[in-house]
Image (cartoon, grey):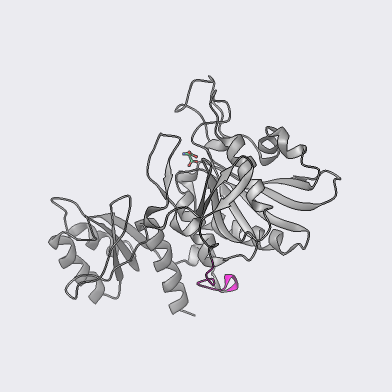
């Protein structure tokens, strides 16, 4: 899709659109729910922030990669984003990349890019909880903060600029479905805050080698099937049997509390393990994860959210076949 650039001199930040509420449009300005996500392209999002055009030191390019409601995010789009991000960040004049995304699966896409790319330049995700047509649209300020962060000297790794806060992509979790303050970093806390157009940083940049070399990732259709289910009162082991019958090679159980799992699920999980399926337990609690391990329980996913534990397990299974 088209890419635009001004003829200003200076460093470049590329804004890559993938859809979401930040690109969403409603019929009425007071409609925060009945809008359609992923309607505006990246060029329109950039054009809605005049302060970006006013930055004499910055060339902002805009490109639309996808127009998804992020609840429909898929592995093929992740691979396309990974490839595009790698190409953009390899350009010497590019200081950083901004990816606009829906909030619903932002913690998953950010985690995937963190583990598959772990860039030395900043790759900054941003999003919005209100559509672009809302009276109180939060997208434009978030986009301005994201571009500022992507052009901040020394910034690196997968980051998220949202609501004036800067999160490490790996720590992000969506904790509210409607409020503008929708994200948290759990016990890790934020990397910093954007205050009046400047970053105030409180902790080191995310720094971790990629889990799997990007070149080693097979096409999406060949990714091992890994599914998530939740432990709850009255849980049934037959659900796990059904996952296995449907081809799951890995299962993440979002356990109760500190990753405890209903005994009916544990019993079924042991059957799945005996059949070669890898099972891990996370926590269904919004904050925190699974602390410590117990010899009698299923392997722990640690502090990762269940969707992030799912990605880690997919990458582990891919790595195991290399
Ligand atoms: N359903 C939207 C999405 O994730 C929600 C949002 O962006 O806030 O694309």
Whether 46 is drawn above or below 240: the answer is above
Quadrant of the image occupied by residue 257: bottom left
Say which of 47 and 227 sits in front.
Answer: 47
Q: Is residue 284 left or right of residue 40?
A: left
| Image coordinates for residue 73, horizontal then vertical, percent | 49, 49
Query: Residue 319 magenta-drawn?
Result: no
Residue 135 seen by the camera: yes
State the residue at coordinates (58%, 70%).
214
Residue 38 seen by the camera: no
Q: Residues in magenta?
A: 207-215
Which secondary structure type mostly characterizes the magenta part of the structure? loop
| Image coordinates for residue 42, horizontal then vertical, percent | 67, 41
Whether 244 is drawn above or below 190: the answer is below
Query: Residue 213 magenta-drawn?
Result: yes
| Image coordinates for residue 256, horizontal then vertical, percent | 21, 55
| Image coordinates for residue 13, horizontal then vertical, percent | 72, 51
Quadrant of the image occupied by residue 295: bottom left
């Amino acid at each position: 899709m088209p890419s635009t650039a001004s003829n200003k001199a200076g460093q470049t930040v590329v804004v890559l659109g993938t859809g979401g509420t930040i690109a969403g449009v409603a019929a009425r300005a007071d409609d925060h729910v009945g809008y359609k996500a992923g309607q505006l392209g990246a060029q329109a999002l950039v054009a809605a922030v005049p302060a970006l055009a006013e930055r004499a030191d910055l060339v902002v390019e805009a490109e639309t990669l996808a127009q998804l409601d992020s609840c429909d995010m898929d592995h093929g789009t992740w691979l396309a984003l990974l490839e595009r991000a790698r190409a953009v960040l390899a350009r010497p004049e590019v200081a950083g990349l901004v990816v606009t995304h829906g909030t619903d699966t932002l913690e998953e896409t950010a985690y995937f890019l963190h583990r598959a790319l772990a860039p030395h330049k900043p790759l900054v995700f941003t999003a919005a909880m209100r559509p672009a047509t809302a009276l109180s649209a939060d997208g434009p300020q978030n986009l301005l903060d994201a571009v500022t962060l992507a052009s901040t000297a020394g910034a690196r790794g997968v980051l998220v600029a949202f609501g004036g806060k800067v999160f490490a992509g790996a720590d992000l979790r969506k904790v509210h479905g409607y409020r503008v303050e929708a994200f948290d970093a759990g016990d890790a806390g934020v990397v910093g805050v954007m205050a009046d157009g400047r970053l105030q940083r409180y902790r080191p940049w995310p720094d971790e080698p990629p889990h799997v070399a990007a070149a080693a990732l097979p096409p999406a259709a060949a990714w091992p099937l890994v599914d998530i289910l939740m432990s709850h009162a009255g849980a049934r082991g037959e659900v796990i049997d059904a996952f296995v019958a449907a081809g799951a090679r890995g299962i993440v159980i979002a356990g109760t509390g500190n990753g405890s799992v209903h005994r009916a699920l544990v019993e079924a999980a042991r059957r799945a393990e005996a059949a070669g399926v890898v099972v891990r337990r996370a926590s269904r609690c919004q904050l925190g994860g699974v602390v410590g391990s117990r010899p009698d329980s299923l392997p722990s996913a640690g502090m990762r959210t269940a969707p992030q534990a799912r990605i880690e397990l997919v990458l582990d299974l891919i790595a195991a076949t290399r």
